[in-house]
Image: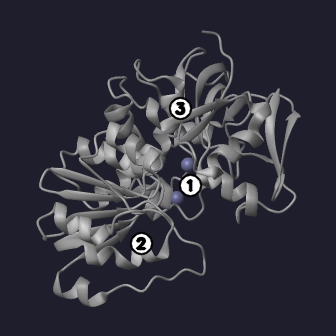
């Protein structure tokens, strides 16, 4: 079968590798869609601490497809089932796993990092990953592409839960890439009374507008703080979500918030970037500073129910489709920031 194999930083090759063997408890998924994420780009460039040098790996952790084969001991899943999966498989025993926070498990395994991921024709889901809740049936209304992009959406839901976005809130989303767009959709879904989206590229802002943003701020032309204060009658917003990896954006988020405001640092920064935080703003205005990473299986299940039902148009978030042979072009498209999310698609039976 065809697979895009990561060999070392800077090197991915499309190879012909054997279809994985299916053990008694395993499920084999014929991949139909696998979207490209910033994490894939980072691994492609720099590798990953959980991936020893010289280990070939198929990347891609945002995956959906149909079951092509099941092991002899598998009772709950059938050939032909339309499925998607969550990347981080917890150990199932630690304190985090016992609280349902599989993404925080210190000894997690992950599709696309320690296990082969979705940029291949057939993906093996080991029995232990199924047992820990990482395989999901797609709702009838969800296409395979939607099933794939629900993974980053679930991370956004996790972030919004941390800052408890509700109908009381004016929410500022900084960044209008795919992540900022999911935050926009979810903030509206949570009933936020005002969603402001800030970005430098107008085409991305326009997409956020199509997805329901109430106010758009082009930070290439307008001063973000001035605009936020104008749009909130000088009060500031209740929630800031930073979905750009920018030290200064995080450092200045406290200036944009109303009293009791909450910040979610959604995007990580490079190792060297330590933004200065105005702790007096936290203290005197009782601000809450949070960060989130990844999502739990519960978040994923819930976001599938919220956005994967077919009645929310997610097509603006998918900018281009590629076949696996064109993995490099797809990676470049993703890195360029020119479009939204690229998806690797595979032919199927329907
Ligand atoms: Zn991802
Ligand atoms: Zn664990």
Residue that mark 1 sits on = 91
In depth, the one of 181 and 220 nearer the eye is 220
Q: Nearer the viewer, mark 3 or mark 1?
A: 3
Mark 1 CB within 8 Å of ligand 2:
yes
List x then y, in percent, for residue 206.
38, 43
Residue that mark 2 sits on = 249
- Quadrant of residue 309 within the rendered picture: top left
Would residue 230 appear left or right of 212 to someone viewing this image?
left
Residue 84's label in the rendered image is 3
* Contact flag, marks 2 and 1 (Cβ < 8 Å): no
How far is mark 3 from mark 1, CA to CA?
20 Å
Q: In the rendered view, would you say 19 is above or below 266?
A: above
How crowded pointer 2 is (Cα within 10 Å; few <14, some 14-19, many 20+) is rated as: some
Q: Residue at x 24, y 52 (%)?
A: 195
In depth, the one of 67 and 290 nearer the eye is 290
List x then y, in percent, for residue 233.
11, 66
Quarter containing the C terminus: top right
How far is mark 3 from mark 2, CA to CA?
34 Å
- Quadrant of residue 33 within the rendered picture: top right
């Amino acid at each position: 079968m065809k697979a895009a194999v990561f060999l070392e930083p800077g090197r991915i090759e499309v190879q012909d590798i054997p279809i994985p063997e299916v053990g008694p408890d395993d499920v084999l998924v014929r991949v139909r869609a696998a979207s490209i994420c910033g994490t894939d780009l980072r691994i492609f460039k720099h590798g990953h601490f959980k991936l020893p040098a010289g280990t070939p790996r198929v990347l891609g952790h945002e995956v959906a497809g149909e079951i092509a084969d099941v092991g002899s001991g598998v009772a709950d899943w059938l050939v032909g089932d339309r499925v998607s999966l969550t990347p981080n498989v917890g150990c199932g025993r630690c304190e985090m796993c016992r609280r349902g926070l599989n993404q925080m498990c210190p000894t997690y395994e992950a599709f696309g990092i320690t296990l082969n991921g979705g940029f291949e024709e057939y993906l093996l889901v080991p029995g232990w990953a199924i047992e820990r809740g990482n395989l999901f049936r797609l709702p009838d209304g969800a296409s395979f592409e939607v099933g794939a992009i629900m993974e980053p959406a679930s991370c956004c839901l996790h972030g919004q839960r941390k800052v408890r976005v509700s109908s009381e809130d004016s929410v500022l989303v900084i960044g209008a890439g795919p992540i900022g767009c999911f935050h926009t959709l979810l903030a509206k879904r949570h009933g936020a009374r005002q969603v402001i989206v800030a970005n430098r590229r107008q085409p991305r802002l326009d997409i956020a507008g199509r997805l329901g943003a109430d106010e758009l701020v082009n930070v290439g032309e307008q001063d973000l703080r001035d605009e936020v204060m104008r749009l909130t009658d000088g009060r500031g917003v209740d929630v800031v979500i930073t979905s750009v990896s920018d030290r200064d954006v995080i450092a200045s988020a406290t200036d944009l918030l109303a009293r009791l405001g909450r910040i979610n640092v959604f995007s990580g920064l490079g190792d060297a970037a330590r933004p200065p935080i105005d702790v007096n703003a936290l203290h005197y205005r009782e601000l809450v500073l949070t960060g989130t990473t990844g999502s739990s299986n519960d978040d994923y299940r819930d976001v599938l129910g919220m956005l994967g039902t077919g009645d929310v148009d997610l097509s603006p978030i998918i900018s281009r489709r590629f076949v696996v042979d064109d993995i490099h072009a797809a990676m470049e498209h993703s890195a360029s920031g020119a479009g939204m999310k690229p998806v690797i698609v595979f032919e199927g039976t329907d």
